[in-house]
Amino acid sequence: MDLVVESPALRIERIVSSGQVTPEGEWYDQETDEWVLLVAGAARLHIEGEGEDRALSEGDWILLPAHCRHRVTWTCAAPPMVWLAVHFRPDRQAK
């Protein structure tokens, strides 16, 4: 993960994956909202409470509200998959 920008109200990360997934039984459960853009490659996300994984391909994006439990169930191994993740707190005003 490469940290691109960080401030009290915003964090932007560039994440490169090559076949990595969230370990079975583990979930992301974040304090902030997260907007994710799939810049390159393909992936599947499982969101708790949904019956099927969400397939994402290059150019797709998703908004995950704070505490939306989710996990990465598949990423393409080659070419590497690139995410741009923007974490933010909508209740805080940027100064």
Image (tube, helix red, strand yellow):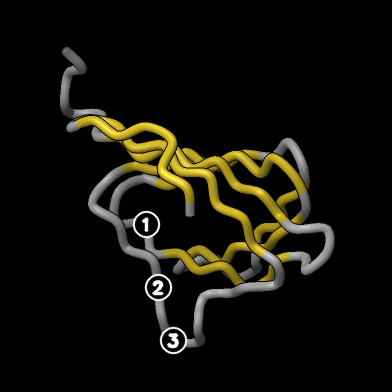
Q: Nearer the viewer, mark 1 or mark 2?
A: 2
Q: 42 left or right of 7?
A: right
Q: Which residue occupies the extreme bottom position in the image?
A: 24
Q: How many marks?
A: 3
Give the image quarter of residue 43: bottom right
The image shows residue 49 at horizontal and vertical percentages of: 46, 68
Crowd rating for badge 2 (residues with CA inside 10 Å; few <14, some 14–19, many 20+): some
The image shows residue 58 at horizontal and vertical percentages of: 77, 42
Query: Which dot marks residue 25?
Result: 3
Q: Is residue 39 above or below residue 51?
A: above
Q: Nearer the viewer, mark 3 or mark 1?
A: 3
**Which badge, 3 or 1, is on the more N-terminal residue?**
3
Mark 3 secondary-structure assignment = loop
Disc 3 vs disc 2: Cβ atoms closer than 8 Å? Answer: no
Identity of the amino acid at label 2? Trp
Q: Which residue occupies the extreme right position in the image?
A: 78
Identity of the amino acid at label 1? Cys
Residue at (45, 43) in percent of width and height: 13
**Residue at the spot of label 2:** 27
Mark 1 secondary-structure assignment = loop
Q: Is residue 13 above or below residue 92?
A: below
Query: Which dot marks residue 68?
Result: 1
Task: State the separation of the CA atoms marked 1 and 2.
Answer: 9 Å
Q: 73 left or right of 22?
A: right
Query: Is 18 or 67 nearer to us in this picture?
Result: 18
Crowd rating for badge 1 (residues with CA inside 10 Å; few <14, some 14–19, many 20+): some
**Which badge, 1 or 2, is on the more N-terminal residue?**
2
Task: State the separation of the CA atoms marked 3 and 1.
Answer: 15 Å
Q: 62 left or right of 19?
A: left
